[in-house]
Image: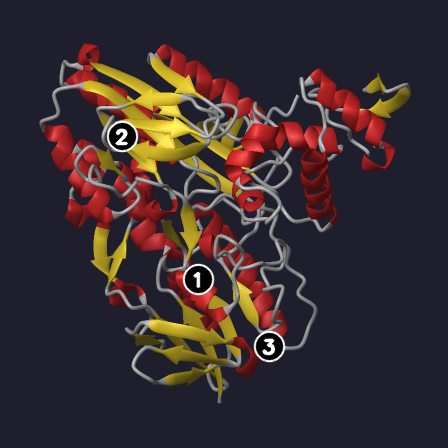
Amino acid sequence: MKRLVILGAGTAGTMMANHLHHKLNRKEWAIDIVDERTEHHYQPGYLFLPFDIYKPEDIIKNIKDFIPSDVNLITKQIDRIVASDNYIQLAGGDQLHYDLLIIATGAKIAPEETEGMNGEQWYQSVFDFYTFDGALALRNKLRDWQGGNLVIHITEMPIKCPVAPLEFAFLADSYFQHKKMRDKVNITYVTPLSGAFTKPKSTAALEHLLQEKNIAIESDFAISEVDNENKTIVDYGGKVVPFDLLVTVPTNKGDALMERSGLGDELNYVPTNKETLQSKAYANIFVIGDATNVPASKAGSVAHFEADILTENILHFVKNETLAAAFDGHANCFIETGDSKALLIDFNYTHEPVEGKFPFAAIGPLQLLKESRMNHWGKLAFRWIYWNVLLKGTPIPFVSANMSTAGKNFN
Amino acid sequence: MEKTIAQKTVQVNEEGYLTNFAEWNKEIAEEIAAENNIVLSPKHWEVINYVQNEFKNESPLTIRKIGKSGVVDIKEFYALFPVGPLKTATKIAGIPKPAGCI
């Protein structure tokens, strides 16, 4: 009997377990999935928790409810991957041999990478919303905050869901308006990028929205430290931005397991072939989702599209065939813009987001790169789709793994 | 588009980055540096050589990576190339502007 081991039972790992448990020949293959946690969090929900739009119970379920019964779920810490000898060293001494390994250990925030970030103001006036604890603490802070300088900040790229900090800014604008205190809040968006987003056409659209919502933007800001005493953030070039409330996205890193195992780059992401999703170091290791270093967005939609490609390639690999399926970097993201509206962007390695209709050319019903209420309903509906369709590996109707150019205005 | 830098006609993109590294030479670097009010010192050249090597190795460049390169730390990097150091250094080095992120 051969053994496939999946590390990580988050979005990507869970989808792979669901794809492979009926696609692999189970008379030949046993499947294990390892995760130290017992809860599965709907991470896009962290964006809505601070604004009292979602409640904790909307975004937390049990990992085991999403793992097929014929897949062995191991709830243990992973000490190390010993890739040269094809086994996993689990905490506590057990070893788990594999013939084929899928790394799906994700990315997480590392506030300790920036001087002063997790200092005395951490969770007092400095918050993240990329963890459940951070988002909840921020909700409690916002409930009775009296106003002042709200600074929304990105430390460095890449980050998970690169549009989330912008969405946070838009939702904050809307939240304070509804609380009738928008005039008491200055919102500043501070980014290491040269503009609001990474791709030119969406940057133009998003900067227009920032302006319309009276949100100031401070770009090209490379943070050197959070000054807890003076409540400012300071950039290497000497720029200083004062805050009363700092909502920061700290440096994101892959799991420290990669460092312990000698498999990561300088940010603990695993060097991965961006088309086949095979690790560059070992032929029998594949990587999916936020754990890779591929130049695609770190987002659930990307993991979903990658899962289709990776499933095909795993099936090729076990038959000693060429890895024929090639991922194109497809990402599909709703961007909440406040007041029950949202934008939708659809892009890949080579095509930036543009205007158009989605998923059906000329019909839509969703509009690309334009605000609409339909897009917002799409985003809210997505939570249901996530729990009921996406994690189970069921294809989302009419949305293919590789990007379609139909209905898009590439001028 | 075409641009003449240091008496040589080269291909650049709309932001002034060389699109063909083979056309780069040291005189071009000095002239682009001068446009950015920088006079190249031996330390600047160490950084330029480093980023060119990373480019040849197809290894994505970030400010963090430069800080850990052993060539300069981040503070020194800003002192050498004060405004947008990574963007300026790569332009002088004749390599594409780092996408940095997605």
* Placement of A370 over or under A286, stated as above or below: above
**Pointer 1 or 3: first along the chain:** 1
Tell me if label 3 and label 2 are in contact, CB under 8 Å. Answer: no
Residue A377 position by quadrant: top left
Q: Residue furthest front?
A: B42
Q: Nearer the viewer, residue A125 or A373?
A: A125
Which disc number belongs to residue A401? none
Amino acid beneath label 1: Ala
Question: Do tags 2 and 1 sit on the same chain?
Answer: yes
Residue at 31% of width from left, 47% of height from top? A43
**Residue A229 in picture, x, y percent from top left:** 23, 30
Q: Nearer the viewer, mark 2 or mark 1?
A: 2
Pointer 3: residues within 10 angstroms few (<14), some, or many (20+)? some
Measured as percent of width and height from the top left, residue A129 is found at 27, 40
Q: Amino acid at mark 2?
A: Leu
Q: Is residue A86 above or below residue A229?
A: below
Query: Pointer 1: residues within 10 angstroms few (<14), some, or many (20+)?
Result: many
Per the rendering, the mark at residue A246 is 2
